[in-house]
């Protein structure tokens, strides 16, 4: 029996119009994850691994950086703000807040808030659940 995600991935550009987001069936998404606003504009690379209890806001891209085969891996309890881009072979540890429109290209330790282009650490020792929308 063929799974629905596998069948849906056989569409060309129709999948974007039907489903609003590009989330290949090979993406590993942990339990209790949430795509805010119906996942509008979310694009995930097929090899991405998302931990549990992750909130992904609209217009987020998580993927490789062209020449790198490895893609980002997010830990648990992560808030990814609207429009954020997480690019390259990096690891996002748990309990982490990524600000809106941030471009994350380097791994950062847990318990941090990052924002900016390119993203830099703004604060240490935070709890990702302090974000109101969560």
Image (spheres, rainbow, N blue to C red):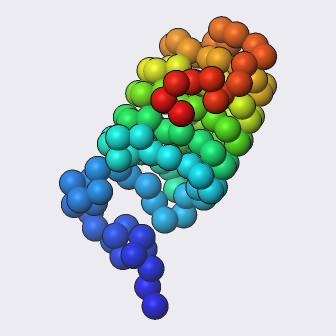
Question: Looking at the picture, does residue 107 appear above or below residue 51?
Answer: above
Image quarter for residue 110? top right
Which residue lies at the image location 72% right of the left edge and 19% below the top edge? 126
Towards the viewer: 109 or 129:
129
Which residue lies at the image location 65% right of the left edge and 28% below the top edge? 128
Question: Looking at the picture, does residue 55 appear above or below residue 7?
Answer: above
Q: Is residue 85 left or right of residue 12?
A: right
Can you see residue 121?
Answer: yes
Which residue lies at the image location 71% right of the left edge and 41% below the top edge? 75
Question: Looking at the picture, does residue 14 appear above or below residue 82?
Answer: below
Where does the image place residue 28, in percent across and percent down from the top left?
Answer: 60, 58
Towards the viewer: 127 or 45:
127
Which residue lies at the image location 49% right of the left edge and 39% below the top edge? 56
Q: Is residue 29 left or right of residue 94?
A: left
Can you see residue 71?
Answer: no
Towards the viewer: 37 or 80:
37
Where does the image place residue 132, in percent across and percent down from the top left?
Answer: 52, 24
Q: How many marks?
A: 0
Image quarter for residue 123? top right
Where does the image place residue 106, in percent across and percent down from the top left?
Answer: 67, 25
Question: Most extreme residue toward the bottom, as rendered?
Answer: 1
Where does the image place residue 85, in percent across and percent down from the top left?
Answer: 49, 30
């Amino acid at each position: 029996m063929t799974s629905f995600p596998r069948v849906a991935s056989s569409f060309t550009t129709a999948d974007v119009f039907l489903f609003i987001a590009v989330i290949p069936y090979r993406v590993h998404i942990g339990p209790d994850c949430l795509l805010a606003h119906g996942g509008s504009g979310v694009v995930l690379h097929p090899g991405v691994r998302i931990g549990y209890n992750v909130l992904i806001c609209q217009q987020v891209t998580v993927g490789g950086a062209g020449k790198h085969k490895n893609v980002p891996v997010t830990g648990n309890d992560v808030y990814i703000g609207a429009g954020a881009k997480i690019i390259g072979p990096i690891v996002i540890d748990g309990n982490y807040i990524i600000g809106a429109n941030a471009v994350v290209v380097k791994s950062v330790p847990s318990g941090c808030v990052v924002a900016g282009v390119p993203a830099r650490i703004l604060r240490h020792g935070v709890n990702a659940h302090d974000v109101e929308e969560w």
